[in-house]
Amino acid sequence: MLELRANCECCDKDLSPDVTDAMICSYECTYCRSCVESVLENVCPNCGGGFFHDQFDQESQDETELV
């Protein structure tokens, strides 16, 4: 599973795994939703990929563990 960083890499906003504001790319670049949408336009400046909510990945992981 990808590891969410504690702060937005753009604006340094504090992020925690349980907030819906955290966005992460496949290379674990972590940003707040505001920066992803308004500054980065959903393109990671480090890897060129898109973003998703880390929380969604956690839900998938939890379902897999229950099976």
Image (cartoon, rainbow, N blue to C red):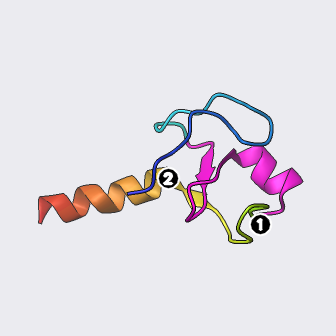
Quarter of the figure with the C terminus: bottom left
Asked if residue 62 lies left or right of residue 31, the reply is left
x and y percentages locating residue 7 in the rendered image: 64, 34
Describe the element under mark 1 as helix, strand or loop. loop
Q: How many residues crowd mark 1 within 10 Å: few (<14), some (14–19), many (20+)?
A: some
What residue is shown with label 2? 54
Q: Quadrant of the N terminus?
A: bottom left
Vertical comparison of 38 with 48: above or below? above
Q: Residue at x 46, y 48 (%)?
A: 3
State yes or no: discs 2 and 1 in contact (Cβ < 8 Å): no
The quarter of the displayed image where residue 48 is located: bottom right
Residue 52 in percent (x, y) is at 58, 61
Magenta stretch: includes residue 30: yes
Q: Which amino acid is tagged 1? A: Val
Which residue type carries mark 2?
Asp
Q: In this view of the protein, which residue sits in the foreground, 28 or 65?
A: 28
Q: Quadrant of residue 64?
A: bottom left
Q: Measure how far apart labels 2 and 1 are at the Cα level.
A: 16 Å
Disc 2 secondary structure class: helix
Q: Which residues are magenta?
A: 20-43
Against 65, residue 3 (above or below) is above
Please give left or right for residue 18 compared with residue 29 in the image: left
- Please tell me which residue is depicted at 72% across the width and 42% down the height of the picture: 9
The local crowd at label 2, few if under 14, some if 14 to 19, many if 20 or more residues have their Cα within 10 Å, is many
Q: Is 64 left, or right, of 57 in this rendering?
A: left
Which is nearer the N-term, disc 2 or disc 1? 1
Residue bearing the label numbered 1: 43
